[in-house]
Every structure is written in structure tokens, then in C-alpha cells.
Amino acid sequence: MSGGTRVGRAGIAIAMAIGLGIGTHAEARHGPRGDVIVEIVDERGVRFEQFPTRSSGNAYRAYVRAERGAPYRILVRNGTGERVGVVIAVDGRNIISGERSELGRSEPMYVLTPWSRQEYTGWRTSLSDVHEFYFTDWRDSYAEAFGDRSAKGVIAVAVYREKERPPELFRQPYEERAERDGKSAESPSASAKRSDEPGTGFGDRRHEPAVRVAFEAERRAASKLFLKYEWAETLCRKGIADCERDRNRFWDDDLAFAPYPPGRR
């Protein structure tokens, strides 16, 4: 977001002014002191299943089972007694500015107060509104509209601790997002191949007000979380999910014939 006063060296930090989201069972527990939790939930707060995979250092990685056409929300819980900033990128794009993200501390970020939780539901188009996230085919995704295929199907969160004691929060009047500093977006290829990979769409408009706050992030992220969402059939094919329970016993079984009764052959 441009056109406003940048706050410290952390860039634009935003605190949500709406009610808190509903949490479910915790999964990703990496963050400052191991207490920042990230989950992907549906509109009712029900968690999309996660399958943890390799993690190293301060980075947590997991697969998420996506459902075609389903709206989703990124639930972040701050289990610390400090404010934290979170840079969130979906398919490689910052969810506040829409710009390509490197998860850096100079990017626009959301701020969570101590012991709080918040659901982030869409691409922010102003301080008042977002457009909802939903799982869709890649060709329909927000990132593909800008020709950005660098981080397909990945929800990434970088957690930053605050460098100094927080100043008082301050509010600014509602303002529309200004044009992107004269930068021209990369045009998507007109001949982009059809792909069965999932992406995140730019869904319906949703009123979700936010305010600007002062927040100076530490130099390095305390933790990073990468959630790779895939269709159920892809997780099955890769052997990540145990899919036996998903089989239809009246449909999917291999052809078999009636066995002889015991002692009759």
C-alpha cells in the first residue's frame, strides 16, 4: 500500500479492527517462543487438514488438503505476551499490497496484539475491504493474473518480533490504496498451459476494516511457516495422505469375483 506515511523501518503495519476469528485444533506451532500458530480454516472455523513435512531451523512446512471452490481463511494465533508482526504471502503475493513478496520486514504486515488471534480472509484492496480467498484452479488465481508462477500453491507467513516497546496506536482516516508506484505488472502469458495445480482466487468483496499502527520489526524473522496446499487426489498420489479411508467401497474397489465357500473347492 502506498500513498500513506510509512511507519518506522517496518513499512506499513496494519491491525485488524474487526472481531476475532474462531480457532480450532493447533498445528503449526513455530514462532516467537514457539507460540505463534497458523492454520487454514473454512468459513465456519473448521480446519483444513495439515500434513507436516520437513522442517529446518526456524522454518515449518506442511501440506494442506485444499477443496475446490472453498473459501478459506488464514488463522494466526499469537500465544505470546508481545505484539508480533506477520508478513503473509499467498502464491508469492503479499496479501495487503498484492506485490510479489520476499517475506521481508519492509513489506506491509499485520500486527497481532498479545494473546490474540485473527483470521485473514482475503486480498486487501483498501483499509475497509478485502476480496475473499478461495481455492481454485491455477489459471483462475490472483497470482496468475500478474504472470507470477514463482510460488504456486504456497501460503507463507513470516513472524517478526517487535524491536522496541510499542508506541500508542493511532488511526488514520479511510483511504483507498494508491496505484503501485508506477510499477507495471508482468503480463501473464496468453498461451499459459492448463494446469491441475491449485491457486487462490480473488473472490467476493468483504467489509473488513483495519487501521494503521506503528510497529518496528526486528531485523530477522523469528520464524517462517510454509503451507503448500494441494488437491486431495494429489496428496494421495504423492503418498502424503492416507487415502484408504477416502475410498468408496461401492465404487472404487478393484474388480473381484466371489470366492468359493470354505471347504467347497
Image (cartoon, helix red, strand yellow):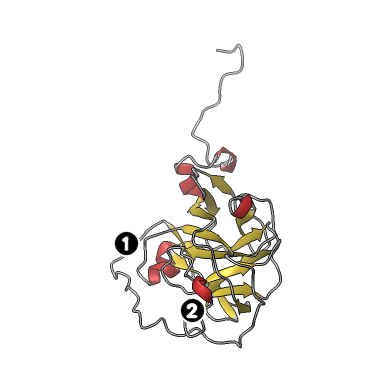
Circle 1 — which element? Answer: loop
Residue highlighted by disc 2:
1
Q: In the picture shown, does residue 263 fall above or below 155?
A: above
Q: CA distance from mark 1 to mark 2?
A: 31 Å
Foreground: 123 or 226?
226
Mark 1 vs mark 2: give the one in front. 2
Circle 2 — which element? Answer: loop
Q: In the picture shown, does residue 66 fall above or below 108?
A: above
Task: Check disc 2: other Cα within 10 Å, few if <14, some if 14-19, many if 20+.
Answer: many
Foreground: 210 or 111?
111
Residue highlighted by disc 1:
193
Task: Count the numbered circles shown.
Answer: 2
Q: In the picture shown, does residue 231 fall above or below 236?
A: below
| Residue 18 in view of the camera | yes
| Image coordinates for residue 70, horizontal then vertical, percent | 57, 62
Amino acid at dot 2 = Met
Residue visible at 49% across and 72% down? 9
| Image coordinates for residue 96, horizontal then vertical, percent | 51, 73
| Residue 121 in view of the camera | no
Task: Check disc 1: other Cα within 10 Å, few if <14, some if 14-19, many if 20+.
Answer: few
Amino acid at dot 1 = Lys
Q: Is the residue under label 2 in contact with that under label 1 (CB below 8 Å)?
A: no
The quarter in which the C terminus is drawn is top right
Q: Which mark is residue 27?
A: none
Foreground: 155 or 114?
114
Residue visible at 46% across and 63% down? 103
Residue visible at 52% across and 64% down? 88
Residue visible at 44% across and 62% down? 137
Please give left or right for residue 61 compared with residue 45 in the image. Answer: left
| Image coordinates for residue 77, horizontal then vertical, percent | 65, 59
**Residue extending furthest toward the front:** 164
Sequence order check, earlier mark of 1 and 2: 2
